[in-house]
Image: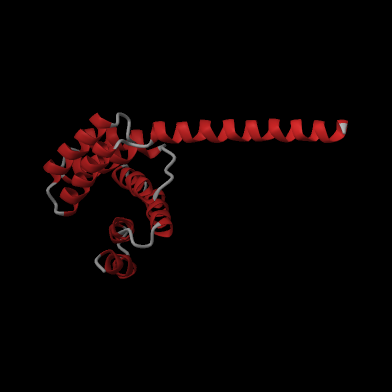
Amino acid sequence: RLGLSRCRRSCAVFLAIALACLLESSARAAAVRPPLAAIQSFEEGVAAYQAARFDAAIAAFNKAMGQHPGWKTALGFRAMCRWTNGNNRVAVEDARSVAESAPDVAEAFVARGMARYVLKDMEGAKRDFKEATRMDPRYALGYFGLGSVLSSQSRAQEALEPLDRAVE
């Protein structure tokens, strides 16, 4: 009887610890997850980026970062827009901040890939874009980024496949 009681207490303690860890990790994830308004602003920025309306994209990414300060994914996209607009100095500042981030979703890998592209780290950018396409094979910007890297490396023939996938 003493052994069974001890076993039940051990199980109860184990379950309590597991529950506490789960609640802590859920709270941490919720604290990091951008609020809906920031996600909507980010999506507006991506749509403007894809339509080559870079000033509008920068404004939307700025708004997203105002709603979720320190959001590296939005910062990486903003870096690419600034670089495309020829504002290289501030693009590099944004890109340096993103280049050392630890992405965990396809969009974040694309953002870091864009940052690395701006910093002329083509091999790092290529790895990030490939990882984005592995994580989400339907995410066109991963293929577009990969094709852009290959094209910039004078590998036009190899660039065609990912660029074709980007527009499917």
Q: Residue at x 43, y 54 (%)?
A: 131
Q: Quadrant of the C terminus?
A: bottom left
Q: Is residue 140 above or below residue 4?
A: below
Along the viewing direction, whichever of 9 and 20 lies nearer the viewer:
9
Please provide percent x and percent y for residue 38. 25, 37
Splitting the image into 4 quarters, where does residue 88 fall?
top left
Is 91 displayed left or right of 70 in the figure? left
Is 142 displayed left or right of 6 in the figure? left
Along the viewing direction, whichever of 10 and 102 lies nearer the viewer:
10
Please provide percent x and percent y for residue 3. 86, 34
Q: Residue at x 36, y 44 (%)?
A: 112
Q: How many dots with numbers? A: 0
Along the viewing direction, whichever of 13 and 167 lies nearer the viewer:
13
Splitting the image into 4 quarters, where does residue 126 fall?
bottom left
Q: Quadrant of the N terminus?
A: top right
Please provide percent x and percent y for residue 102. 44, 40
Please provide percent x and percent y for residue 96. 34, 35
Farthest-out residue, front: 1
Q: Is residue 45 visible?
A: yes
Q: Is residue 89 visible?
A: no
Q: Residue at x 43, y 56 (%)?
A: 135
Which color mode does the image show?
secondary structure
Splitting the image into 4 quarters, where does residue 85 fall?
top left
